[in-house]
Structure formats: structure tokens, C-alpha cells
Amino acid sequence: MRPWNRGGRAMSEMPVASGADSSLPFEERLERGEVVYFPKSPFPTPADADHTFLLQQQLNGPIHKNIGYDPATGKASGFVRGNSDDAERLRDLFAEFSRTTTEWLTKALPRYHADWQLDRISYRPEEEATRRLRHTSRNDLLHVDAFPGRPSQGRRILRVFANVNPSEPRIWVTSSPFAALLEKYGEAAGLPRGNGADWLGRVREGVVRLFRPSKVQRSAYDSFMLRFHDYLKRNEDFQERGPKRLWTFPPGSAWLAFTDTCSHSVLRGRYALEHSYFVSPHVLALPDESPPALLTRACAKTKSLRAA
């Protein structure tokens, strides 16, 4: 493996969102829906010949939204295949990115490492401003994340991003966190009826199934989060009049977010690497602020209001 760009910014030097309480622990800032941003990536990213090679990779047709890599299987997908040596080199590059990113994250967020699952790596070589995608797949519309093919079963979605574009920024917009969006739009989006205990039970059953599945199934939590994801993208009031903050991530920068809590969109940029992780609820610093816990309370509140 060729030399990579080496990060190394100290945790205390991290900028935070305007108005955020920087005295809060790193985990709490993330779990409350903040974006944590590093002007210089604290973990290695591809450099020199590897970087040039990565920038040359192209999506294989319109059916793939991104080039993907699964650390569990070592398989890469969605790229235009050249010779076998190039395919192996791309897999090795993604495997190294997974290893070094996870190594850094383990030190930065040790409590999560106690019970997380490595999810996929995505490489985004396309310019976001000119992409043509179906409405619910568009990245430029504000949303919270839910993965149709990879249900989280009640676990949190932590995502680590790096802008590997050599000269251009990646532009994001963020809006209200999940708690505020659930309060405002939950019922209109189809908040499930029932008491809180039933809701939480269904989520826990989903987690149990995950570890001995014949086929991965969606829990009630996953089903609602997918509906909510699509609802937010279709909601013109939220898209046009919701509060917004513009983020400009320059070349070489990195950022983290729990994207099931932090509503976000991507307006512009190409050449970005991203690694997702599923974090179990019991290792969270603020488990009562997680989307499953918020949904549990919202369902119980909705039931009591209807009974009144």
C-alpha cells in the first residue's frame, strides 16, 4: 500500500457548530445531532498514486448511486471494471480506508467500539449538483438517514466523511434534529399507534433477529424511519422554510454525524469517501435521546392524547 495523507488534529482543536456547547463530551455532541468537523482529516486518506487512481474510478451505469465496499465480505460494487489488478487495487484501497478510519474512531469514541458493527464504505465520484436521481434518492433534499437494504434494527447510524477532492469543497446544508422534526411532522408521517412498551419491544425483537437471521428483516422502527425519510424529502414546507445552516467542507477535511438524527443534504461536490457504522443503543452516552427512545415516548404521548 502506498503512502497516505496522514491526519492528526487533536480532539481539543475541533471546531463545532455555531451555538453548540463545546464543553460537552464528543459523544454527546454527536448524539444531540451536531456535525463534528475537522478542517484537516484526523485519519489517513489516499495520497499520491492511490489518490490519483481513486479519482479515476467511475460509476457503472445509472442503477448505482455510489461505488460501495462491504468490509465484512471484501466485495466492491458499482464501479466500471477494468482488469482484475485494478479491481483488486480498489478493494485494497477501501479495506485500508476502513482499517485506518476504524482505528482512529476506536480511539476517539471508545464507548461505541464496545458494540458497533462496521457498515459499508461509499465512494461518491459524481458531481452532486448535476445528478439525476428519483425524488426519494436525491441527496440535495434534506432528510434523516434510513437504509432500505440495510435496516439498522434500532441501532444508531454513525457516518464518517472525508472530502478527497483535490481542489473543490463539498457543500452541505443541515436543519433541525430528529427530535424537533418528529414533534412537528411525526403524526403526519404516519407515527405508529400503540403504547411505548410495544414500540420498544418491536425494536428489540428486530435486534435479536439480526444476530441469527435467515433473512434480515425490518423492524417497526426501520419501517417508520424509511417513511419519515421519504416524507421529509417530499415535504415542501420543510424543504423550503425549515431552518438551515450551510457547511463548506474544503479539500482534505473530514466530518462526523449521526445521520439518523442530523437532518442534512448535499448540494455540491464530488470525490468523497464515507464509512458508516451501526452503534448499539446500550453503548450510547444519551440513550434516551436516540430516535428509538424518542419514538417510544412519542407513541405513548400520542396514545394518551387520543384516549383523552
Image (cartoon, rainbow, N blue to C red):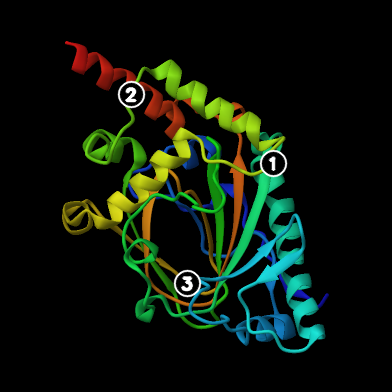
Which residue is under mark 2? 299
Where residue 250 sits in the image (x, y, percent)? 47, 72
The answer to whether 292 is drawn above or below residue 215 in the figure is above
Q: Tell me which numbered mark, 1 or 3, is placed earlier along the sequence.
A: 1
Where residue 96 sits in the image (x, y, percent)? 76, 65
Q: Is residue 129 visible?
A: yes
Where residue 28 sits in the image (x, y, percent)? 49, 35
- Give the mark toward the camera: 2 or 3: 2
Depth order, front residue of 22/290: 290
Q: Element under label 3?
A: loop
The amino acid type of the residue labelled 3 equals Pro
The amino acid type of the residue labelled 1 equals Ser
The residue carrying pointer 2 sits among few (fewer than 14), some (14 to 19) or many (20 or more) residues within 10 Å by Cα, namely many
Where residue 115 sits in the image (x, y, percent)? 69, 35
* Residue at the (71%, 83%) spot, across then down: 48
Which residue is under mark 1? 214
Checking the image for residue 155, the label placed there is: none
- Give the mark toward the camera: 2 or 1: 1
Depth order, front residue of 171/203: 203
Give the CA separation, mark 2 to mark 3.
41 Å
Give the CA separation, mark 2 to mark 1.
30 Å
Which quadrant of the figure contains the N terminus?
Answer: bottom right
Q: Tell me which numbered mark, 2 or 1, is placed earlier along the sequence.
A: 1
* Residue at the (75%, 71%) spot, across then down: 91
Checking the image for residue 250, the label placed there is: 3
Give the side of residue 118 with respect to residue 273, left or right: right
